[in-house]
Image (cartoon, rainbow, N blue to C red):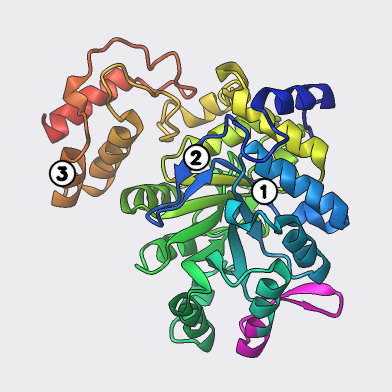
Amino acid sequence: MGKRPLILAVAALLAIGCGGKGKQNSMTYRPLGATGLEVSEISIGCGGFEGLDTAGSIQLMHAALDSGMNYIDLYDANPKVRSNIGAALKGRRDEMIIQGHIGTVWQDGQYKRTRDLEETTRGFEDMLQRLGTDHIEVGMIHITDSPEEWYELEGSPYLDYVFKLKKEGKIKHIGLSSHNAEVALMAAKSGWVEVIMFSLNPAFDRLRGGATPWTEGAMDNLQGGIDPVRVEFYDYCATHKIGVTVMKTFGGGGRLLDEKRSPLGFAYTPEQCIAYCLAKPCISTCILGIDNMDELLADLHYLHATPQEKDYSSAGHRQVASLGGDCTYCNHCSPCTVGIPIARVNELLDKAESDGMSEELRSQYAALPHHASECTHCGSCLSRCPFGVDIPARMDQAAALFGS
């Protein structure tokens, strides 16, 4: 999967003080939207536990906890996986925030997605029992990938059950997982979804319209910049404090780490992919599929990677020509020497120019901590922009349009 050599991984482990409960680590924590939870910016997925026995699961989980990871996504209904994770969390349950999926069951030796109330209830209660807990922090409505599926949730026995679980305290917050930006935006605007698990990386951001990575031909027809629906989704979640947890950080199966398999035609490093996602203000954590200790240690290198190692613009140099100087709101230009949120100003400017000025846009601009009129034209942002945007000129345009 293009991971770092083990020698560097071991050095990473030693550098962050991994290996003992309560030890200091260099993990950074972020708010999970408005839930009141603080989550590690790197977290662990359940997929890797499929190939581990109980002892191996305990070793991997304890190493993750000792590194400072405090968030796990558990969609897998495999009884072995659930039981092994439960064994690994025994005595340390309070250190891990669990994002568990509602509507996954184990049938005929394989995972099944369901909305059937009886199956859903059985699957959820089995998860709690095998984890050895009476609740999970985030109850995730499992995979909703089309507007039709979203509309079918309304008034359904399945959704009534989700609300019932929250009322009973068996889940503390309601979430939803999706690979579809249109659905993710609908969920964000629903008023009751607090956390959204979304597939995000430099390639998926270029999907067109409501396409998912699995839509036929979608990955062969990527656009130059970030899809506008995704931009609106990220902006809405940041503004309304909805937590976003990232899946498919490396493109699914690590495709972005391999030049031959990457849909962009060039490879990124794990550090660059993680940095790309975490640059978006709405993102709370990147959930990484970690199969073994070597991969865990390699991914933890991000915690003390240099700015140069995290610089995703160096991998995406071919993007510059295709984007033609358009801002993608990636925040790579930050920090501004006078504190202007450059990406946000550019986004509001683009909306005003494309859709027309509105009182809502004026209000959002006025609420910014610093405004475009404060730009000193120092040019420090220009060297950091990977897409050749004339940022000082854009600030002048925004100042003229919005005023001080």
Against 36, residue 296 (above or below) is: above
Against 217, residue 294 (above or below) is: above
Q: Secondary structure at mark 3?
A: helix
Q: Secondary structure at mark 2?
A: strand
Residue 142 appears at what percent x and percent y? 60, 69
**Residue corresponding to mark 3:** 362
Residue 219 appears at what percent x and percent y? 65, 49
* Mark 2 or 3, nearer chain start: 2
What residue is drawn where x is 70% and y is 57%? 89
**Mark 3 → mark 1, Cα distance in angstroms:** 40 Å
**Residue corresponding to mark 1:** 44
**Mark 2 → mark 1, Cα distance in angstroms:** 14 Å
In reply to whether residue 119 is colored magenta, the answer given is: yes
* Mark 3 or 1, nearer chain start: 1
What residue is drawn where x is 45% and y is 33%? 330
- Number of residues whose C-alpha sits closer than 10 Å to that of mark 2, classed few (under 14), some (14–19) or many (20 or more): some
**Residue corresponding to mark 2:** 29
Against 111, residue 32 (above or below) is: above
Residue 151 appears at what percent x and percent y? 46, 78
Which amino acid, mark 3?
Arg
What residue is drawn where x is 78% and y is 32%? 3
- Number of residues whose C-alpha sits closer than 10 Å to that of mark 1, classed few (under 14), some (14–19) or many (20 or more): many
Residue 363 appears at what percent x and percent y? 16, 46
Which amino acid, mark 1?
Ile
**Mark 2 → mark 3, Cα distance in angstroms:** 32 Å
Quarter of the rendering containing residue 298? top right
